[in-house]
Amino acid sequence: MESLIDHCKNAYRTAKLVKEPFPYYVIDNFLPAETFAELVNSGLAEHALLKRQFETSLEAGKSVHGNEGMNAAANIPIKLLGGEFGSQLISELFGINGVSSMFDRPNFGGYYPFHQMNTGGLLGSHIDHSFSADRQIHVANCVYYASPEWPEEWGGETVLFDKTGLREVARVRPKPNRLLVFLHSSTAFHGVDVLKSPSSSKRMTYYMDYYASEENACNAYAQAQNIPNSGRMRTWLHGTIFVPFHPLGEFRSPDLLNVKRFRGEATYVFHYVKYLLGKLLSKLRLDS
């Protein structure tokens, strides 16, 4: 009988690489059907411990959760993607050596592995943090779609943008038991389109990110661009950065009458400007 690990390996080793807007894979039927059924029936939405909630124009209807309270079935994607299997997956798909994950760090490195979104929710065009607390470079992400059903008309696709974060290039539907894996850098902009699901149906995903040394990250980025490894990086120091007032390829004016919300929008602008300055300084260092 095929084991869980063998099934998952066979699933990702038959997946096709897509190079635009940045290298990614879509892996369907990632878990065996019986394992996915156990996961769906585990009550993961009720038992995952709430850590943070978001309700802004760029992060709407989203909550992130720790795995405290989750049973063994609900923890399978976390242990699988965060453990040795996940590191091997990233190494094989992107040619990165010495991969570790947020699962290897205390309290997941301050990020959380289970996410939920409600109807009407969205995530604007953004990139994730570029370094871990121990100064490893953030090189890859996995998003595992765990909702028991998700018809196409419910929306909520993961949207992949060009390197400016302004132009949509590709969409990945949050199909149940699907895994999205992508190479992360400081230009890997992505988001989530507006959810149109019934209020009783949440978009449930598992998230895992991966880290490597600067040398190993350089090798992977050079390989992805089909250029010799010159040591040039596409990553510089920043936290999670959203493109302000531009959540999904469409300009949205700030709410000047809502003081609390406008203050939040101003924070997005501040961090985005810092990101652009970091990008400029990084380019100047490379060109010098």
Image (cartoon, rainbow, N blue to C red):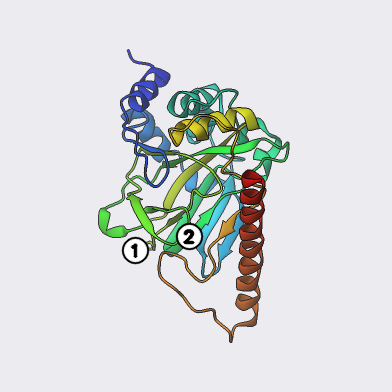
Relative to 283, say whether 134 is above or below: above
If you read the primary sequence from the N terminus, does the residue marked by circle 1 or circle 2 appear first? 2
Residue 75, can we see it? Answer: no
Which of the numbered marks, if any, corresponds to residue 196? Answer: 1
Along the viewing direction, whichever of 145 and 159 lies nearer the viewer: 159
Which of the numbered marks, if any, corresponds to residue 233? Answer: none
Indicate the position of residue 275 as horizontal and vertical percent values.
Answer: 63, 57
- For residue 48, which quarter of the picture? top right
- For residue 201, which quarter of the picture? bottom left
Instruction: Count residues near mark 2 (Cα–Cα under 10 Å), then give few for <14, some for 14-19, many for 20+.
Output: many
Along the viewing direction, whichever of 199 and 79 lies nearer the viewer: 79
Q: Which residue is drawn at the image coordinates 62% and 40% (left, top)?
A: 68
* Kind of residue at badge 2: Leu
Q: Which residue is drawn at the image coordinates 64% and 82% (left, top)?
A: 259
Which of the numbered marks, if any, corresponds to residue 123? Answer: 2
Q: Horizontal placement of 222 versus 154: left or right?
A: right
Indicate the position of residue 243 as horizontal and vertical percent values.
Answer: 53, 63
Indicate the position of residue 200 as horizontal and vertical percent values.
Answer: 38, 59
Mark 2 element type: strand
